[in-house]
Amino acid sequence: MTRPDTLAGLPVLFVMAAPAEYGPALKARITPLMTGIGPIEAATQLTFALAQMAEKPRLVVSLGSAGSARLAQTQVYQVGAVAYRDMDASALGVEKGRTPLLDLPAVIDLPHRIPDLPVASLSTGGSIVSGAAYDSIAQDMVDMETFALLRVTQHFDLPLIGLRGISDGAEDLRGMSDWTQYLDVIDGKLAQAVDALEEALASGAIRL
């Protein structure tokens, strides 16, 4: 059964998509729920895990890699706001990104902030983004899980923090190695962000 880690005396559930993103620096600090790649797998696995927990975490953290054509490669950013790029009901007169009959904005803010860690907006969807495809995305970076995880945490009334290291996007993707080549560097920087999160929880800079 999945168990949260403990940070500053609080149960915190870390969620990642792929083992390739989970390197030695993170392994020394956390034991994440590994969901698999994409919004469906993320939502399914997190929902199942939380439903099975006798004691829920106080915080869920989505972390891993992201793509961006405008942000610094290998830099880690915390998610300031997240959008769902796959949802398009504009033929019904609904703003692109908004789910019909669901009272949520197209872009949802994540209010908790780790001091001194740069903030960026995130677009979640089920597609790999590369090259000119970035031109149609308003957000700073892209992933395949965080919006789905947010909807699950909203259902369970839990706060979510997103941490993403930029693994690709400066050039067109040509294969798997273009995604994985910087994951070892990102692992170390995500570990530093986890340390900063623990400090923020301990100091009261982040209050849950």
Image: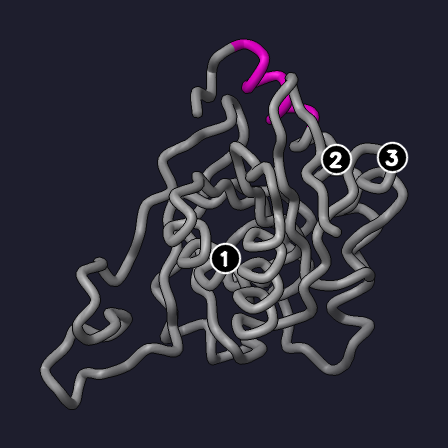
- Where is residue 75 drawn, in percent x and y? 64, 44
Whether the residues at callouts 2 and 3 have beta carbons within 8 Å, the answer is yes
Mark 3: secondary structure: loop
Give the magenta-colored segment's residue range: 195-203
Magenta stretch contains residue 199: yes
**Which of the numbered marks, if any, corresponds to residue 149?**
1
Q: Which residue is mark 2?
A: 191
Mark 1: secondary structure: helix
- The residue that appears at 47% across and 79% down in the rendered structure is 133
The one nearer the camera, 56 or 19, is 56
- The residue that appears at 20% across and 75% down in the rendered structure is 100
Compared across the picture, whether 51 is left or right of 122 comes to: right
Q: Nearer the viewer, mark 2 or mark 1?
A: 1
Compared across the picture, whether 133 is left or right of 23 comes to: left
Disc 3 marks a residue whose amino acid type is: Ala
The one nearer the camera, 155 or 36, is 155
- Where is residue 72 drawn, in percent x and y? 60, 49
Point out the tag, 2 or 3, that comes first from the N-terminus.
3
Magenta stretch contains residue 158: no
Callout count: 3
Seen as rendered, the residue at the extreme top is 203
- Where is residue 153 drawn, in percent x and y? 45, 50
Q: Nearer the viewer, mark 1 or mark 3?
A: 1
Point out the tag, 1 or 3, that comes first from the N-terminus.
3
- The residue that appears at 47% across and 45% down in the rendered structure is 79
